[in-house]
Image (tube, rainbow, N blue to C red):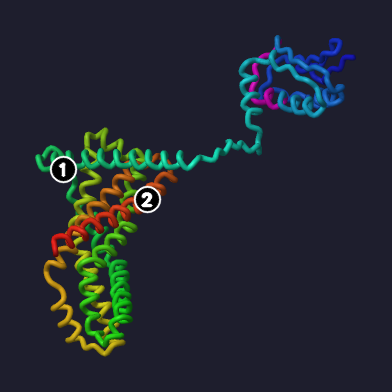
Amino acid sequence: MGTSSQTADIVLHQHQHIYEIALTGDWLIDAESKDTGSIVSAIGQLPAGSRLLFTTAELGRWDSVLVTEIITILEVAHQTGVLVDRSSLPEAIQGLLKLVYTAPEGAEIKSPIQAASWIDSIRQTLASVSNDLSALLEFVGLLVMTVYDLLRGNSHFRRVDLWLQIQECGPAALPIVTLISLLVGLILAFVGAVQLSLFGAEIYIANLVSLGMTREMGGLMTAIIMSGRTGAAYAAQLGTMRVNDEIDALKTMNLEPLAFLVIPRMTALILIMPLLCLYADLMGIIGGAMVSITLFDISVTEYVDRTINAVQMKDFVIGFIKCAVFGILIALAGCLRGMQCGRSASAVGDAATSAVVTSIVFIVVADSVMTLICNRLGV
């Protein structure tokens, strides 16, 4: 039997057990609309297992209208169980249909999950650490060369950038440093008082707090605060500049990114960290004084006198040196992760997180090494 549509542009014919759809004319959006409902209805009534093919010898121009109609026909044929031969369609249409049916809408593409052995996990971890160390050494080498060029006058950076960075990592950080250092001083005083009160030696709370803050806790807590506040900010700033191609623009203008972006940030932290350490020491000692004076009936004069007798200049110097080293490490970790950032919004967040983790690891390791050195030297 033969069935034809209501228009001359699409016709369904039967040749024995093979059904043929003839496509003719121009299939454009702004052309006359074609009623394909009868063709679709006829295909829906074909017996299952029938074969359907297309002829396009007289097909003119076409656009998405034709592709949409063919997709409708293919869906109805699939539901009916009719076998469709698409090989006679133009190659462009076949390519579009392949894209449509490669990943159907709503289909979930799941990649096979393979459980990695613990040996593979260790191997991947070691490879990641090796790559990070290589990147760190390369970055430090480039930084040293940039500093050398700056000293020779072959490179430069804007002084206003240095002052802006000093403002950001110095005065702007005083509120959080004040709060944390004051609380650390309070905690040290409370912890020390628990044991010292057993021997009636509460007066030595001043010794404990002053030595603990100047030699260790003042610089360490300041460094941790700055790693989360300033180190992450450095990574996010440089990462965003990388996403926006601003770093590539600096290279295009023959400006060294390390000199223009990294050196001002690192210099600002090296200069500001010892000052913040001194301020944190003072706040911690004040916190210890608040506990001693209000809870243990120690006078202000006694507390100050014990503090002066307990703390020496070398204790402040050790704290300053540690904080300066911490400043270098924080700036190094933040700028390194920022320069390594990918070119997406999620990569910026990953860079900031990685900068904080890396800087804290650097700080703890460096603090341990310097404390061991001080103990061996007897200072």
- Disc nearer the start of the sequence (2/1): 1
Question: In the image, residue 24 lies at what x, y percent?
Answer: 73, 14
Is 296 drawn above or below residue 288 in the view shown?
Answer: below
Q: Is residue 263 visible?
A: yes
Residue 96, relative to residue 227: is it above or below? above
Q: Which mark is residue 352?
A: 2
Q: Is residue 270 left or right of residue 96?
A: left
**In the image as oriented, which residue stretches furthest toward the left?**
152
Crowding around mark 2 (Cα neighbors within 10 Å: few <14, some 14 to 19, many 20+) is: many
The residue sitting at 86% across, 22% down in the picture is 46
Residue 167 on image: x %, y %: 23, 59
Q: Quadrant of the C terminus?
A: bottom left
Residue at image coords 51%, 40% = 116
List x then y, in percent, for residue 213.
23, 70
Residue 77, by quadrant, is top right
- In the foreground, 102 or 153: 102
Residue 86 occupies quadrant: top right
**Magenta span contains residue 63:** yes
Residue that carries the numbered disc 1 in the rendered image: 147
| Boundaries of the magenta span | 58-69
